[in-house]
Image (cartoon, rainbow, N blue to C red):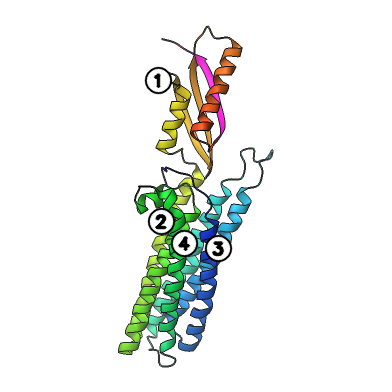
Amino acid sequence: MSQSSHSGHSGAGAIIAALGANLGIAVLKFLAFALTRSSSMLAEGIHSVADSGNQVLLLLGGRASRKQADEEHPFGYGRNRYIYAFIVSIIIFALGGLFALYEGFEKLHDPHGITEWQWVPVAVLVGSILLEGNSFRVAVKESSGLKGKQGWLRFLRTSKNPELPVLLLEDAGALVGLLLALIGVGMTLLTGNGLWDAFGTLAIGILLVFIAVFLAVEIKSLILGEAASPEDLAKIRAAIEDGDSERIIHIKTVHLGPEEILVAAKIRIHDADTGRAVADEIDAAEVRIREAVPAARIIYLEPDIFRA
C-alpha cells in the first residue's frame, strides 16, 4: 500500500454484511462436517469462524480509531484501524491457512471417502457460495467509489483504507475456497477417493496463506507511516505555492490514519516581510491546503528567508 489516491471510509456496511453471511455459513459448514467428516468442510468451517472474528476486529478497530487525541497520543488514534487489520491478517494465516494445511496433510494419511449424508456438503457449499457472493457484491460496491479508474490490484496495494481491501480479499478468498472445497468434495463423491478432499483442503490452505501474507505486507507499510498519495501531494504543493513554484524548500507528509494526513513543510518568504505578514501568509496557506485536501488536518509550515 505504498501510494494511494483516496482515503475512504471504514466500510461498516460491507463489514456487517460479511459478518452476517459468515456466521450463517459457519453453522452450515460445521453441520456438514459433523455429518460427513469431510476435512474440506472442517477447514471451511474454521475459515468462516476466523472471518467472523475478523469482521468483529475491523469494527472494533474503527471504533478505537475515533478516540480523541490526548497527551499520550497527541496525533490521535487513527492508526488503530491499521493495527486491527494487521491482526486480521495474522488470524487468516494461523486459523485459516495453517489449520487448513494441517487438516489437508492429516487427510492425506487417512483418505477416507464420504459415505453418509453425501448430498449435505454439496448443498451447503452451493448455499455458502450464494451467501458469500452477496457479501462480496456489497464489498465491491462500497469499494468501487474509492477505486476510481485504477485497477483492482492497484487499489488493493495502494488504498489507505485497510477495511475494504481486507474484506475484498477475504470474500474473494472465501469464494475461491468454496469452489475448491466443492471440487474436492464433488470428486470424492464421484470417485470414492478421499485424496480429492485432502487436495481441496490443501489448496484452500495455500490460498489463505497467500492472502494473509499479502495483507500483512501491505498493512505493515501503513503502520510504519505512508506519505500522502501523489494526487494529494500535488494538490498540497499547489496550495502552498499559490503560483510561486520556488516557494517550497522541502515537504513531508504522512498518514496518521486513513482520513488524516500530517503535512510538514519549509517554505520561503521574502526577507522584507514583517512578522504579521509571515503569519498571515502561513494562515492563508493552511486554509488553501485544507480546502484542497480535507484529510490534511495537521499542518506545520516553517518559514525561511527567500534567497534568489
Task: Name the residue carrying label 4.
Answer: 138
Task: Name the residue carrying label 2.
Answer: 214
Q: Which residue is drawn at 34% across and 78% down?
A: 183
Judge depth for marks 4 and 1 and give the one in front: 4
Judge depth for marks 2 and 1 and give the one in front: 1
What type is the residue that disc 4 sits on? Val
Q: Residue at x 51, y 29 (%)?
A: 289
Q: How far is the residue under mark 2 from the one under mark 1? A: 39 Å
**Residue lying at the far left of the rendered structure:** 191
- Left or right of 78, for residue 150: left
User: Can you say which quadrant of the picture contains the C terminus?
Assistant: top left
**Where residue 148 sits: x, y (%)?**
39, 47
Tell me, yes or no, whether the two marked residues, 3 and 2, touch with CB atoms within 8 Å.
no
**Where residue 63 sits: x, y (%)?**
62, 53
Counting labels gives: 4
Label 3's element? helix
Q: How far is the residue under mark 1 from the one under mark 3? A: 47 Å
Image-quadrant location for residue 180? bottom left
Q: Residues within 10 Å of mark 1 (few under 14, many from 20)?
A: few
Q: How far is the residue under mark 2 from the one under mark 4? A: 22 Å
Q: Which residue is drawn at 54% across and 9% down?
A: 273
What type is the residue that disc 3 sits on? Ile
The answer to which of 189 and 22 lies nearer the viewer is 22
- Left or right of 92, for residue 199: left
Query: Residue 16 — which label?
Result: 3
Label 4's element? helix
Q: How far is the residue under mark 3 from the one under mark 2? A: 23 Å
Quick one: label 4 or label 3, which is nearer the N terminus?
3
Tell me, yes or no, whether the two marked residues, 1 and 3, touch with CB atoms within 8 Å.
no
What type is the residue that disc 2 sits on? Phe
